Image: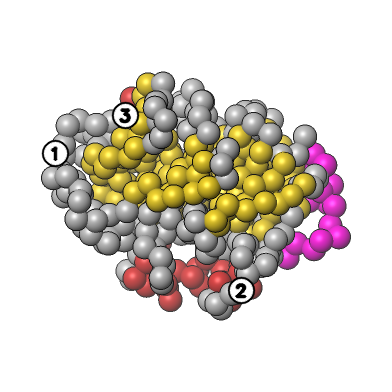
Amino acid sequence: MYKRTATLAALALAACSGKFAGPAYVEGAVNAEDLVALPGSRWIVTSGLDAPGASGRLSLIDREAKSARVLFMADSRQEPYKHAGEPGGAPDCPGAPEPGKFGAHGIALRLTNPGKGILFAINHTGREAVELFALDWSGDGVTAKWTGCVPLPPGVLSNGVAPLPGGRIAVTWMNAPEFFAGPAGRENAATWIPKFIAGEKTGYAATWRLGEGWRKLPGSEGSVPNGIEASADGSQLFVAIWRASEVRRIDLASGQVARVKLDFMPDNLRLGDDGRLWTAGAAGEAGAYFACAAKPGCHNDYRVASIDPGAMTAEVIVHPDTRPAFGDATAAVRVGDELWLGSNPARRVAVFAAPR
């Protein structure tokens, strides 16, 4: 277990720790498990898992106004599904999410034109699939239109998604069927949570492209593969192995793997506009994490790290904020001189002055 008195030298990290100034909070971004900043704009899109009293959604944050609103929720107003060959979409997608059956986990953006892109969102509610949305922020606001999906194989519990060149996407299979004797999905938490706590191998990352289907990514196996992010040129993938407290860089051409160890369990990954890889996640022991998560109002300590994607060295920023209104940070993204944090069990996001 990580102790607050431990030094980064003892943890074999290559940079000194820093601290935040702040925080401030933006209300209304419910269960913001992951964050994506829209390039050249004041907007941040967050995912939103469904939970008791909160329907699944995508939320939109205005960084200037420090406000949030709903960007998308599955309802009966969705237009009939028509597959039009959108990047990453599958022709066997059964249609738009049914009313009330959408809960967004990991998200990622593929920029298609200035002010426009495709947002990919992992959906656990109603079906296990990557949902696609056409985003347009070229005007004064932002619009999101559902355009298609990529269904996941039976028995897979996914987590993060990253677009790659050539119409490919990469998805972390947090639970892959071959590592479980029985049902491996969200229906059987009694099976997979003990494996998570024990640090057993549970899954890997897989890539998908129209005409190819799903292919396992060598070098990505581990205990609870979580966040995933592609390098700017799409030649490398970064994968957070939550239970192993490490982030891996996988070269897609050579298969070479580099690792950086952290003093916490990293969740989502996001390249900031400073060129560094940002992550947030749970501190402490896995067993204590799940015990706290099962108690209403209990929040775990978290850590934030910025990673040099070339050298694969990390700077860990210690700032647990476990008040009932915020805790369990699962995502971090740097935009300009601000660092934004998302949290699945919270109804707000946090914003700090970014460390120098």
Q: How far apart are marks 3 and 2 (CA)?
A: 41 Å
Residue 297 image point, x, y percent: 59, 74
Question: Which SS does the magenta portion mostly show?
Answer: loop
Pointer 1 with pointer 2, Cβ within 8 A: no
- Give the residue at x 29% y 51%: 129
Q: The disc labelled 1 sits on which kind of residue?
A: Lys
Query: Sequence-wise, which precedes: disc 3 or disc 1?
Result: 1
In front of the other: label 3 or label 1?
1
Residue 11 is inside the magenta segment? yes
Query: Sequence-wise, which precedes: disc 3 or disc 2?
Result: 3
* Residue on which the image places disc 1: 82
Residue 177 image point, x, y percent: 34, 60
- Give the residue at x 27% y 62%: 100
Q: In this view, does 49 lie above or below 135?
A: below
**Rendering quarter of residue 296:** bottom right
Residue 108 image point, x, y percent: 43, 39
Q: In which quarter of the image is the N terminus?
A: bottom right
Q: How far apart are marks 3 and 1 (CA)?
A: 18 Å
Q: Going by the image, does 297 lie left or right of 157?
A: right
Q: Which mark is residue 216?
A: none
Pointer 3 with pointer 2, Cβ within 8 A: no
> Start and end of the magenta stretch?
1-16
Instruction: Give neighbour class at mark 3: few <14, some 14-19, many 20+ (Cα, 10 Å).
Output: some
Q: Going by the image, does 194 lie left or right of 306?
A: left
Q: Going by the image, does 201 lie left or right of 137?
A: right
Q: Residue 298 carries which label?
A: 2
Q: How far apart are marks 1 and 2 (CA)?
A: 44 Å
Mark 2 falls on what kind of element?
loop
* Residue on which the image places disc 3: 167
